[in-house]
Amino acid sequence: MLAGGRCARLPPLSMRRLAIQLTGAWFLILALSSVTAAQIPLLGETDSDSWERISETHYRFIGQVEIRQPDLSLVADVVDVFTDTNTLEASGSVVFVQGTQRISADRIEFNLATATGVFHNAFGTMTLGVERRPGQFGTQEPDVMFRGERIEKIGNTRYKIVNGGFTTCVQPTPRWELTAGTVIVNVDDYALLTNSLFKVKGVPVLYLPVFYYPINKEDRATGLLIPQYGSSTIQGQTISNAFFWAINRSHDATLLHDLFMRTGQGTGGEYRYVLGAGSEGNLRMYFLNEHEATYASGGQNTIVPARRSYQFNGAANQSLSRRLRARGRVDYFSDITVQQTYNTSLYEASRRARTIAMGLTGAWGTYTVTGAYERAETFFGTSSSSLNGATPRVSFARAERPIGRTPVYFSMGADYSHLLRESRFGTGVTDHGLDRIDLLPQVRVPFTRWPFLTVNSSVLWRNTYWTESIDRVQVPEGISRRYLDFRSQVVGPVFTRIWDTPDNGYAERVKHTIEPFFNFQRL
């Protein structure tokens, strides 16, 4: 400050010199930064608030450090880089990202050449497969969350977790988690745990010394499923085990075994396949072997008799060729009391019908042939039932086509069925079954030459033959029924008028049609 309170002014030349000095210092900093990046080629693009060179092979980056490479990135507060070993040590809010893998840690040691390292007190997520799936709120959610006191990245997609765990239930509070002393996670393949503990809502449920858990991108892999434990009044303590077999991308199977401490055991299996659009199926089989047992219910002892039963459930829809297609469905059980006693599903426990249905359909131009087998039995109690179906049924149909070049159209249908009709009361069976043959040719003549008047006439002749008839009771004497059905429908004359309604907010025009029709039928 000069006397009088005025600020001293630098000469113009001194101002220029100061500007030149500041500019030179700035370029010197940039030059040093570029020299550092050039001396560490494996580091890639690096940003930080400041850096210093500790030794010939040791560099330290401080403050909002970010390292970017084509396949990974690293963010930390402090990063020490050692060029002689191609390694770095990062600490303070460390975040490591590679592909869909993301790991947060307090401190890491990382090898830039091999892309392997150690993460201390870390938490990570990863997504299985190539495509990321949208989450509940439109975000891309991970598939696996893992944590550990020490996480070692021992390969490109391989991790070793010490004193940690993982879960595929990705939400703020996972419903379940697997913890272990050591976990080997191979992304898109499996997780191998030793001294593992399965927790549900934080509560320990199951301990396994060795546990293999598939986490491949297809969500299916061959292996043992998690055992299930339960308790039942009738069956006592139960243990269920299952083995899943991923045969290939289109086929898989599951083998089941249930041990009932009080009544016996059950075995079964399930097979599924998908060969393409419209060609898929599944089948589930279960066999139950029970010995005689006694259980207490309502203050009384109830005896369960020794018995063997089975159950089949499945459906299939299969294209055999361009012209043939097969369909099938089975919901069958051998013992209605077992069906209604052991099923926990309300639908299955209350179901009293067992069904077997299958069919084969072929189409050749305008001709269609169908063969079917249908059998349905409905129970009334445990010893009475009614049986219905067709075993078999063969149908033939010819679609409507003109006869030559005439305006006359011809179509035909034919059907043969062995009708299944039985009533069962205890050991007694009443059979009302018989055979039926049906023939239905039809001729139709349409008249559509005038747009205001159309006439559509048809003649149908039907002949039905049954191998049995009723003379107060059903007797083995055939009977036929024949009839001729003549129908004609006349539409018109049709009157149409269109009004322009430009001021109408609903429509610019209104169309009014009067279309009388007359139906005539003689049977």
Image (spheres, grey):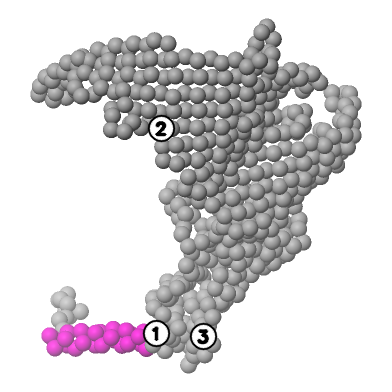
**Residue located 46% across and 72% down the image:** 72
**Residue located 44% across and 24% down the image:** 441
Q: Quadrant of residue 249?
A: bottom right
User: Sequence order check: which comes first, mark 1 or mark 2?
Assistant: 1
Eyeballing the image, is 99 above or below 463? below
130, 379: nearer the viewer: 379
Q: Position of residue 279 (x, y in %)?
A: 53, 47
Q: Quadrant of residue 51?
A: bottom left
Give the secondary structure at mark 3. Answer: loop
Question: Given contact means CB atoms under 8 Å apart, are the residues at marks 3 and 1 in contact?
Answer: no
Residue 473 within the segment the image draws in magenta? no
> Pointer 3: what residue?
86
Magenta span: helix, strand or loop, mainly? helix
Left or right of 200? Residue 76 is: left
**Residue located 63% across and 40% down the image:** 314
Q: Identify the disc placed on residue 399.
A: 2
Residue 26 within the segment the image draws in magenta? yes
Find the magenta span and give its range.
Answer: 11-35
User: Sequence order check: which comes first, mark 3 or mark 1?
Assistant: 1
Q: Position of residue 274 (x, y in %)?
A: 55, 50
Q: Amino acid at mark 1?
A: Ala
Left or right of 416? Residue 263 is: right
Q: Nearer the viewer, mark 1 or mark 2?
A: 2
14, 305: nearer the viewer: 305
**Residue located 65% across and 48% down the image:** 271
**Is residue 198 visible to us here?**
no
Left or right of 240? Residue 94 is: left
